[in-house]
Amino acid sequence: MATEAIGVRVPARSAGHDLRAVKIVLHREMLRFVNDRTRMLSMLVQPVLWLFVMGTGLGSLVRGSIPGVDYRTFMYPGMISMTVIMTAMFSAGSIVWDREFGFLREMLVAPVSRGAIVIGKCLGGAVVAVGQGVIIVAMAGLVGVPYAPGLIVTLLLEMFLAAFTITAFGVTLAARMKNMQTFFGLMQMAIMPMMFLSGAMFPLANLPSWLHLLTVVNPMTYAVDPMREAVFAHLDVPAAAASMLNPGVRWFDFHVPVGLELGLVAGLGVVLLLVAVVEFRKAE
């Protein structure tokens, strides 16, 4: 007796399905962040220690050389950047976790483009990182930074741009990796030098030529400097202290404007996003 086969129809891919996939991946990243309070606290410990412990200690050493400015005020934009960047990289690393537990394979067989999954992941990582950065922004008054609405909005936009770029970078690294230990080892090797060479913890003025070159070619420098420019624009500090602590980025005698710095970060984010999509299409 012949049996009739039951047909299974897979919905055709469409722009609507891809947008829905972006929304679902974004929503999932936010839920994971909100429900993981241990992760929230652990991501805050390091920047808070740097800001209030290291900043206070270093400030006691340089207090006489930068009158009128608390050294923690100088470090504040850098600590925002550190919080955002570390959170964004951890969000990207969850791809490796999903691969280990089989959830990634379920996403990859869905009738949506892999590019939509990558975009949702990058947007989710950026939103989560900004949410974490907001906690550091809320501490502004403790280090002498005013709660000016214009400053807060500017910092939020700059945080999102930096977080999106770093998440795209992290997704590119994680796309082909199969265990968390490898990813986090590579993440530390990549992120820590970029943070130390971005001017987050020391001024970019009067550096030795070799160190100045490293800061100029470091893409994170162009994420940290706009935040510092925004903060110092809302401070009343002596001109000498401002020129020492907020000299900006220079290419030889050319002072790089903030708009160009943000454009470089945005351009890098787009390039990394495209690379991440290509790497994700190769992933199994």
Image: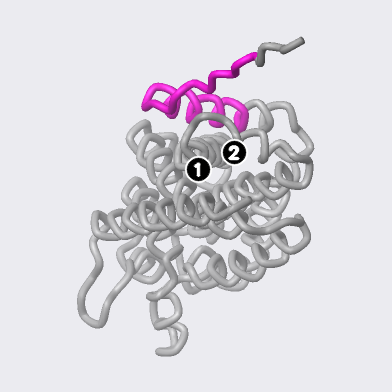
Q: Is residue 160 visible?
A: yes
* Residue 2 or residue 163, whichever sits in front: 2
Q: Position of residue 97 (x, y in %)?
A: 73, 45
For the record, the magenta segment spans: 6-30
Q: Nearer the viewer, residue 30 or 24?
A: 24
Q: Is residue 130 visible?
A: no
* Residue 78 rendering spot, x and y as whole percentages: 51, 57
Amino acid at the residue labelled 2:
Leu
Left or right of 259? Residue 96 is right
Q: Which of these two is toward me, 276 or 1? A: 1
- Kind of element beneath mark 2: helix
Asked if the residue under mark 2 is in contact with the one under mark 1, i.e. CB atoms within 8 Å, the reply is no
Q: Which mark is residue 108?
A: 2
Q: Measuring 48% from the left and 68% from the top, which residue is drawn there? A: 198
Categorize mark 1 by other alpha carbons within 10 Å: few (<14), some (14-19), many (20+): many
Q: Earlier in the sequence, mark 1 or mark 2?
A: 2
Three-letter code, disc 1: Val
Q: Residue at x 24, y 54 (%)?
A: 259
Q: Position of residue 193 (x, y in %)?
A: 58, 72
Q: Which residue is mark 1?
A: 118
Q: Look at the magenta stretch and give its main secondary structure.
A: helix
Q: Is residue 15 magenta?
A: yes
Distance from the alpha carbon under mark 1 to that under mark 2: 11 Å
- Nearer to us of marks 1 and 2 is 2
Please, is residue 116 above or below residue 66 in the view? above
Q: Identify which residue is drawn at 71% across, 42% down.
A: 98
Mark 2 surroundings: few (<14), some (14-19) or many (≥20) residues within 10 A: some
Helix, strand or loop at mark 1: helix
- Let me know if residue 188 is in the magenta part: no
